[in-house]
Amino acid sequence: KRDQLDQDIQDLTEEIADHEHFLATAEGVRKKEKATFEAADLDLEKSVHQISTARDKLKSSEGFLQGKSAASAFAAVRASVETALDMADSLGLVAGTSGLPTLLQQPAEVPVADYTFHAGGIIETLDDLLKAFRDKKVELETAEAKAQSDFERAMQSKAALLKAAQEDLDAKNKKRTETTEAIATAQADMTSTNSVLNDDRTYLKDLTIKCE
C-alpha cells in the first residue's frame, strides 16, 4: 500500500512540475506575442494617420486634381506617402496596377504634367491604401483578441488542473504519513509482543526444569 502511495506521489509531483512549466512558459510566449502585436498595431496606426493626412492635404489643395501646383502639393506629403507605401509593401498591400510607386521613384522635380496625369490615380490609390491599412488593423486586432481569449482560457484550465493535482498530492502525502505511522506502530506492537512471548517461553522453560 505504501509503495503505491509512493508511486502516486511521484506521478503527481511530475504532473505538477509539468503544469507549472506550462504556465510559466505560456506567460512568456503570450507577452512576446502581445509585444509583437502592439508594435505592428502602432505601425499601422501611424500609417493610417500618414495616408489619411496626405490624402486630406491633397484633396484640400486648391487645384491639385486640375494639375495646378500639383507637384508642390504632392512634394509636401511625399515623405509620408513613401513611408506608408513601404509599410504597405511589406504587408503585401500595394496594388500592382497602381502608378503611385512608380511616380514616387521619379525625382522630386518630375514635370508637372506627370502629376496632372496621375492626380486622380494618386487620390484613388491613397483611398485604397487607407482602407487596406484599416482592414489590416482590424484583422490584427481581431486575431489578438482571440489569442488573448484562448490564452486566458488555457491558463484557467491549466491552473485548475494544477490546483487539483496539488490537493491530491497533499492528500496522498497525508495518507502516506498516516500509513507510515500505522506501520511503525504495528512494528512496535509486534516487537513488544515478541518480547512478551520470549519472556513467557523463558519462564515456561525454567518452570519445566524446576518441575522435573
Image: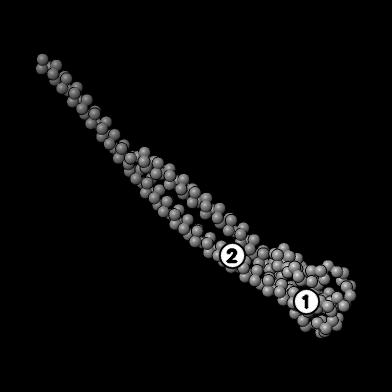
Residue 14, image x, y percentages: 46, 45
Q: Is residue 196 above or below residue 127?
A: above
Asked whether 197 or 64 is in front, the reply is 64
Mark 1: amino acid: Gly
Q: Is residue 191 above or below residue 60?
A: above
Q: Is residue 196 above or below residue 149?
A: above
Mark 2: amino acid: Glu
**Label 1 close to label 2 by CB (< 8 Å):** no
Q: Residue furthest top?
A: 212
**Mark 1 vs mark 2: which is more N-terminal?**
1
Q: Residue at x 73, y 69 (%)?
A: 95
Q: Which mark is residue 144?
A: 2
- Image check: 132 left or right of 156? right
Q: Residue at x 70, y 67 (%)?
A: 93
- Image check: 62 left or right of 10? right
In three-dimensional space, the C-alpha distance between marks 1 and 2, rounded to whole angstroms, equals: 34 Å
